[in-house]
Image (cartoon, rainbow, N blue to C red):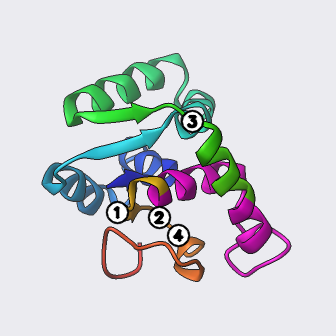
Amino acid sequence: MVIDPSALVAILLNEPERRAFIEAIAAAEVCWLSAASLVELSIVIEVKLGPDGLDDLDLFLATAGVETVAFDHDQALIARAAFQRFGKGRHPAGLNLGDCCAYALARVREAPLLFKGRDFVHTDIRSALTGPY
């Protein structure tokens, strides 16, 4: 399973979806996070929670066994195509750069994506959960 930063933000900010996301991560055979997504996620967490939030993020990722995957050329091409097809201002999904990076890793790994929100439901990516989150 690939994890979009939106799911990890929900966990770290103790949002209502927190429990469902933690359970999905715990149940997954493997969890991947794009290195590009880690940068985006780190910026959001540091802004919202300060430097201590980054410690919490690192601890959660390590404890949950989330593997950070390098962002490579193949992913870059898939992310670019995802923006052309589903990008903000072009499509109801409205994917931004970070979304496109998570999308690309899910495509490369042929894995479902754990995410919060309604953006990815308008794409061809498979959700890791059923129901609105």
Q: Residue at (26%, 26%) from the top-left corner?
A: 62
Q: Secondary structure at mark 1?
A: loop
Q: Which residues are magenta?
A: 81-107
Tell whether position 85 is magenta: yes
Which residue position is annotated with label 1?
17
CB under 8 Å between callouts 4 and 2? yes
Disc 1 from disc 2: Cα separation:
8 Å
Earlier-in-chain disc, 3 versus 1:
1
CB under 8 Å between callouts 3 and 4? no
Disc 4 from disc 2: Cα separation:
4 Å
Q: Secondary structure at mark 2?
A: loop
Q: How many marks?
A: 4
Disc 3 from disc 1: Cα separation:
27 Å
Q: Relative to 121, is 83 above or below?
A: above
Q: Amino acid at mark 1?
A: Glu
Q: Residues within 10 Å of mark 1 (few under 14, many from 20)?
A: some
Q: Amino acid at mark 2?
A: Lys
Which residue position is annotated with label 4?
117
Q: Residues within 10 Å of mark 3 (few under 14, many from 20)?
A: some
Which residue position is annotated with label 3?
71
Of all residues shown, which one is farthest toward the right?
89
Main secondary structure type of the part rendered in magenta: helix
Earlier-in-chain disc, 3 versus 2:
3
Quarter residue 103 falls in: bottom right
